[in-house]
Image (cartoon, grey):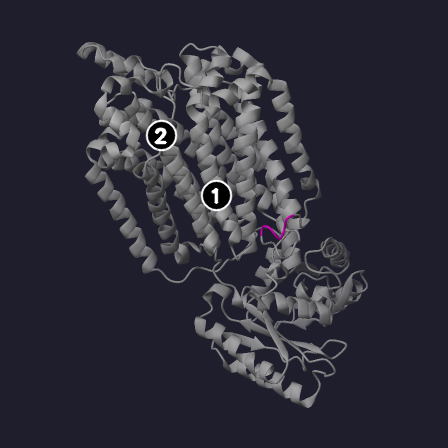
Amino acid sequence: MATFLYKLGRFAFRRRRFVALIWVALLAVAGVGAASSSAPAADSFSIPGTEAQRAFDLLDQRFPGVNADGATARVVFKAPEGESMKDPANKAAVERTVHALRSGSSQVDRVTDPYTARALSKDGRTAYAQVSYKVTGFELSDASKDALKDATEDGRDAGLTVETGGNALQAIPETGATEVIGIAISAVVLVITFGALIAAGLPLLTALIGVGIGVSTITALSSTLDLSSTTSTLATMIGLAVGIDYALFIVSRYRAEITEGREREEAAGRAVGTAGSAVVFAGLTVVIALVGLTVVNIPMLTKMGLAAAGTVVIAVLIALTLIPALLGFAGARALPRKARKTRKGSETDEARGPDTAAGERPNMGTRWARFVLRRPVAVLLTAVIGLGAVAIPAASLELGLPDDGSQPTDTTQRKAYDLLSDGFGAGVNGPLMLVVDGRDAHAGESVKSAAARVAKEVGGLDDVAVVTPPTFNKAGDTAMLNVVPKSKPSSTETEDLVHDIRSTTHGIAQDTGAKTLVTGTTAMNVDVSQKLNDALVPYLALVVGLAFLLLMVVFRSVLVPLKAALGFLLSVVAALGAVVAVFQWGWLSSVFGVEQTGPIMSMMPIFMVGVVFGLAMDYEVFLVTRMREAFVHGERPGEAVVTGFRHGARVVTAAAVIMISVFAGFIGSSDSMIKMIGFGLAIAVFFDAFLVRMAVVPAVLALLGRSAWWLPRWLQKLLPNVDVEGEGLRTQLAGTHAADGPDANTAREPARI
């Protein structure tokens, strides 16, 4: 592989105009496709095979006009202190609003009148009108949204408090200025790392091009493949992070080869041949982790994983081709000013390189590695105990789906949520829907009698506030009931109620033959959590197993991949603990802009496992590959660890800071899910890069010694030799130079970067 990538790097350097033109053309085509595409698709959330989804599907079949997937809105009215919603003036204002809602848009399916639907609170001060649309939230036109907002003004003019909740007002998440700040921090880190604006700008430029192509392609295909706005946000997040990191490693290795005294084309080829091999395998681990999300069988999660994986593939291809091409355009300007002067003044001094300079002080990576080698047990215990302490809150993890209760307190959705809770009880914000299917009822049993029994027995359960009378379809074989819990939608009490209802209705089904299905947001959440829990072990086995095999091929070792996988599990559990502490317990919530604590998003654990595993393996590959390279060249195990840190610690540290800053930039998102993902990924990368890879890894390798690189002979014969360290490439180049004449460059060790 190293030989092929070496040739690819040299080709891209020589044909830089052709390579750059291809990538610019791809960006233009993707941009045109995105510009000509229709609006983003709805954030549909189907869970095949679950009871909640079967209920939705049954509603679509038996109640065609219900449109269970359509957008909804609740317009909540509250009378001033001392007044009632039954007062003639207030009632007239509400009726005018209801009329405006019905006539405001052709996309409106139906609007309930609070007075005929008995949607008045016991104290008479609060009422709400339910608006149902024919289309999903993201398919609503701006005119429909404006009509919804304008209809509330009449009530406000009459002195009422009027707020609107529901998914009809959902919008594409905004990240604000923090995303820009994250990119700015990345730029500063790159400038400090490289000491040259041109070299610092290349990773940023190529990452933006890669993200531009990836996100534009997602946007162009959003309607065709039903891709949501969250999909493109995730692709942007991961594409920026890995795009900058992969380019950083190629540029760093190129500068090291230049410092060795090699010509620029040769340096580009060797950089792609060596560091590029690590980029390919690091990218493969990320792609495996993201594509592996398909095993969960949640379409939304599958699409997010595949789209992000596609963006990672683009980032790898850009690092291998566009980076050497742009280095050809940059010339000597890719080097710091001091290095350019040195190169012009003395080729001999330059060829010595910084690590061979007489009396040079060891860099920070070298000093840290030597410290760990002297105290491996103390460092290992400190890191493991520290991560274990942070992981403790993960034991209290509660899963849920975001609703209006998780919105910022200044939004109309959150205000409507609070008004409904105050007026009708917390459960009204998350009603359960029961669908009674009587087509297979026993002889002599009718769906009406079965539905009446369901309403009676469910109404007698604890935590049930109201059960509405059943509504029947035209065929008279299916009934629909609404159950309003006493507890809020995200509470464990409501989750327990879902299980109680299903147990109760199962007994009724055995007696009557009429099956009852429970759905609604809370029921959907219960089913999602169960599905994700069931899929977690198979997913871990698949992803970790494939990555373990891949790392065995890369490192020619059994214990190094095992250590990498265990270290990852430690960092991801600690990251989940931090997420629980901030978003569920509320620790430091004001610092991260978390206005409402509550359950953690249901897909967060498995999503973090997938994404963080792939990213964690990046640092494992980049850092340990250098150690393996030194060990293969004859250094003792301890010396190899020091060499790996001397050459790679600075760049890995810069890459981690960049990735953390990019992910942290999404903490400012207006969407609670994106905010949680940004925080979780940022803290996970911090734990994995600085505690696991920088502390646990060298400590474990120091304790294992030579056995760390042990591989059974029979396995050596089975595993392919992909030459990630570039040993075959060096042998080939050495043979070429020996045939052409002596070349001092082939004998030099890599320089510190």
What residue sits right under mark 1 in the picture? 661
Residue that protrudes farthest toward the bottom in the picture: 88
Q: Position of residue 440 (x, y in %)?
A: 67, 60
Where's residue 667, x and y in %?
A: 53, 50
**Could you tell me which residue is drawn at 77 percent across and 58 percent down?**
511
Which element carries disc 2, helix, strand or loop? Answer: helix
Q: Which residues are magenta?
A: 588-592
Q: Main secondary structure of the magenta part?
A: loop
Residue 204 among magenta residues = no
Pointer 2 residue = 252
Query: Does residue 590 show up magenta in the picture?
Result: yes
In this view, the residue in front, 578 or 526, is 578
| Residue 466 in which image quadrant | bottom right
Please say if 269 is above or below 441: above
The answer to whether residue 246 is above or below residue 453 is above
Residue 154, horizontal then vertical, whole percent: 56, 83
